[in-house]
Image (spheres, helix red, strand yellow):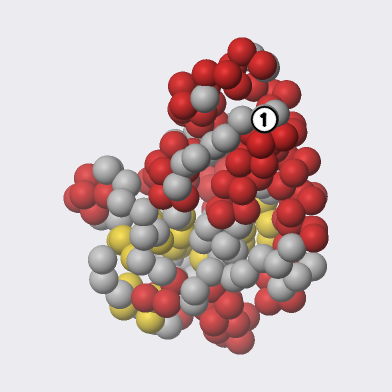
Amino acid sequence: MCALQISIEDYQLYLFDFDGLLVDTEKIHWEAYRKMCANRGLELDWSFPKYCQAAHYGSEALKRNLYAHIPQLLKQEADWRVLYREKKEILLHLLREGSVSMMPGAAELLKTLEIEGVTRCVVTHSPEEQIQAIRDKHPILNTISVWLTREAYTHPKPHPECYLKAIDMLWKPGENVIGFEDTPRGLQALLHTSATPVLVTQVAYREIPQFIEKGVVHLSSLTAVSV
């Protein structure tokens, strides 16, 4: 991992994932799954890094991993949509009632981009309802004028549709684009676009060496971005 030595002038369009990249919500998602299981009398004893390894390759991978880890959960409810709805309701309550921190370096980067008038956009899998609950807590997020939430596109990450849509909406000829993700799933979406791909994570995903070979910049946090 190394600092990304850039200046504001190097890129004219910044694309950001949201959960785990700008705001520290991944631990809240983890807690929501734990509470969902606890409400059913079951224990999800995954550590947070284990949760990330299980969850950040897509919903199907999470479903398989969770059912395999807690077979009683499958016996109780084989319809994943029911469990996901329960988790979603718990998550929304946690977001509204608790505190949500910005990720290290995120607020400072967004403030600089706002001062310099650089175009930026959030491209997220989260729905508008969850996003708004967090934006209400951090005014700096409202300096981002364009938000592509889950309602705005058809195919979820790792399909590149969401990022391609953002670039189609905001890119101007001659501009350089940079995108920031914190999971392999999101990064796969970025890799199919013209954006310079940046993976910001401390999780030891097994694909990181291969990503770096493909030209991905790997950072431990947004504090490593030099602007």
Q: Residue at x 74, y 76 (%)?
A: 139
Which element type, helix, strand or loop, lies under badge 1?
Answer: loop
User: How crowded is the residue under tag 1: few (<14 C-alpha within 10 Å), some, or many (20+)?
Assistant: few
Mark 1 residue type: Gly
Q: Quadrant of the N terminus?
A: bottom left
Residue 144 position within the rendered picture, expressed as x and y whole percent measured from the top left: 67, 69
Q: Residue at x 39, y 59 (%)?
A: 201
Foreground residue among 124 and 35:
35
Q: In this rendering, does residue 106 appear at all?
A: yes
Residue 195 position within the rendered picture, expressed as x and y whole percent measured from the top left: 42, 56
Q: Residue at x 49, y 74 (%)?
A: 104
Residue 143 position within the rendered picture, expressed as x and y whole percent measured from the top left: 70, 74
Splitting the image into 4 quarters, where does residue 176 fall?
Answer: bottom left
Furthest-front residue in this view: 41
Q: Residue at x 51, y 61 (%)?
A: 21
Foreground residue among 108 and 99:
99
Residue 203 position within the rendered picture, expressed as x and y whole percent measured from the top left: 36, 54
Residue 187, placed above or below residue 227: above
Which residue is tagged 1? 41
Residue 170, placed above or below residue 34: below
Foreground residue among 106 and 153:
106
Residue 33, placed above or below residue 176: above
Q: How many marks?
A: 1
Foreground residue among 107 and 54:
54
Q: In this rendering, does residue 196 appear at all?
A: no
